[in-house]
Image: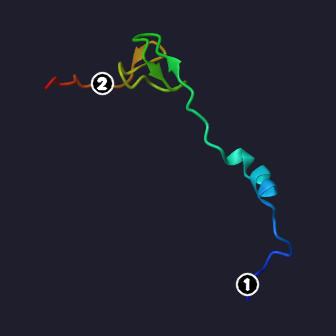
Amino acid sequence: MAAHPKKRIPRAAQGERRSHLALKAMTLVPCPQCKSPKPPHQACPHCGTFRGRQVIQIKAKRTA
Protein backbone atom coordinates (compact mmCIF):
# COMPACT_ATOMS: atom_id res chain seq x y z
CA MET A 1 0.00 0.00 0.00
CA ALA A 2 1.14 3.51 -0.78
CA ALA A 3 1.33 6.36 1.70
CA HIS A 4 -1.48 8.94 1.61
CA PRO A 5 -1.41 12.52 2.89
CA LYS A 6 -3.49 13.10 6.03
CA LYS A 7 -4.82 16.46 4.84
CA ARG A 8 -5.09 18.29 1.53
CA ILE A 9 -2.41 20.99 1.12
CA PRO A 10 -3.79 24.33 -0.14
CA ARG A 11 -2.24 25.88 -3.25
CA ALA A 12 -0.93 28.82 -1.20
CA ALA A 13 1.01 26.52 1.13
CA GLN A 14 2.30 24.57 -1.85
CA GLY A 15 3.48 27.81 -3.46
CA GLU A 16 5.20 28.92 -0.25
CA ARG A 17 7.06 25.64 -0.08
CA ARG A 18 8.18 25.89 -3.71
CA SER A 19 9.10 29.58 -3.60
CA HIS A 20 12.84 28.84 -3.64
CA LEU A 21 12.57 26.70 -6.79
CA ALA A 22 12.18 29.69 -9.14
CA LEU A 23 14.83 30.08 -11.84
CA LYS A 24 17.24 32.99 -11.52
CA ALA A 25 18.85 34.97 -14.32
CA MET A 26 22.49 34.11 -14.95
CA THR A 27 24.97 36.69 -13.61
CA LEU A 28 27.15 38.21 -16.31
CA VAL A 29 30.11 40.56 -16.00
CA PRO A 30 31.99 42.37 -18.79
CA CYS A 31 35.25 40.80 -19.93
CA PRO A 32 38.21 43.10 -19.14
CA GLN A 33 39.78 42.40 -22.56
CA CYS A 34 36.94 42.40 -25.12
CA LYS A 35 34.09 43.86 -22.98
CA SER A 36 31.66 41.09 -24.00
CA PRO A 37 29.43 39.62 -21.24
CA LYS A 38 30.73 36.45 -19.59
CA PRO A 39 30.04 34.45 -16.41
CA PRO A 40 32.18 35.53 -13.44
CA HIS A 41 35.26 33.44 -12.53
CA GLN A 42 35.32 31.76 -15.95
CA ALA A 43 37.33 32.19 -19.13
CA CYS A 44 35.75 34.48 -21.71
CA PRO A 45 34.09 32.40 -24.45
CA HIS A 46 34.71 35.17 -27.03
CA CYS A 47 38.41 36.00 -26.58
CA GLY A 48 39.59 33.06 -24.41
CA THR A 49 41.31 35.07 -21.68
CA PHE A 50 41.16 34.60 -17.91
CA ARG A 51 42.92 36.88 -15.42
CA GLY A 52 44.85 38.58 -18.19
CA ARG A 53 46.20 35.34 -19.74
CA GLN A 54 45.18 33.49 -22.88
CA VAL A 55 43.91 30.14 -21.54
CA ILE A 56 41.88 28.76 -24.47
CA GLN A 57 42.37 29.12 -28.20
CA ILE A 58 39.36 30.56 -30.01
CA LYS A 59 38.93 29.58 -33.66
CA ALA A 60 38.27 32.39 -36.08
CA LYS A 61 34.63 32.53 -37.13
CA ARG A 62 33.96 32.08 -40.84
CA THR A 63 31.71 34.58 -42.55
CA ALA A 64 29.27 33.07 -45.02
- Please tell me which residue lies in front, 27 or 17: 17
Name which quarter of the figure residue 56 lies in. Answer: top left
Tell me if residue 31 comes above or below residue 9 in the rendering. above
Measured as percent of width and height from the top left, residue 29 is found at 53, 19
Does residue 4 appear left or right of residue 32 in this picture? right
Q: CA distance from mark 2 to mark 1?
A: 56 Å
- Give the residue drawn at x 46%, y 20%: 37
Does residue 47 appear left or right of residue 22 in this picture? left
Tell me if residue 61 comes above or below residue 23 in the rendering. above
- Give the residue drawn at x 38%, y 26%: 45
> Which residue ends up furthest to the bottom in the rendered image?
1
* Type of amino acid at the residue the image marks with label 1: Ala
Does residue 58 appear left or right of residue 1 in this picture? left
Total marks placed: 2
Q: Which residue is mark 2?
A: 57
Q: Earlier in the sequence, mark 2 or mark 1?
A: 1
- Please tell me which residue lies in front, 12 or 16: 12
- Give the residue drawn at x 78%, y 79%: 4
Q: Which quadrant of the rendered structure holds the N terminus?
A: bottom right
Q: Which residue is mark 1?
A: 2
> Which residue ends up furthest to the right in the rendered image?
6
Are dots 2 and 1 in contact, CB under 8 Å? no
Q: Callout 1: 10 Å neighbours few (<14), some, many (20+)? A: few
* Type of amino acid at the residue the image marks with label 2: Gln
How are the colours assigned in the image? rainbow
Measured as percent of width and height from the top left, residue 49 is found at 41, 18
- What numbered label is drawn on residue 55? none
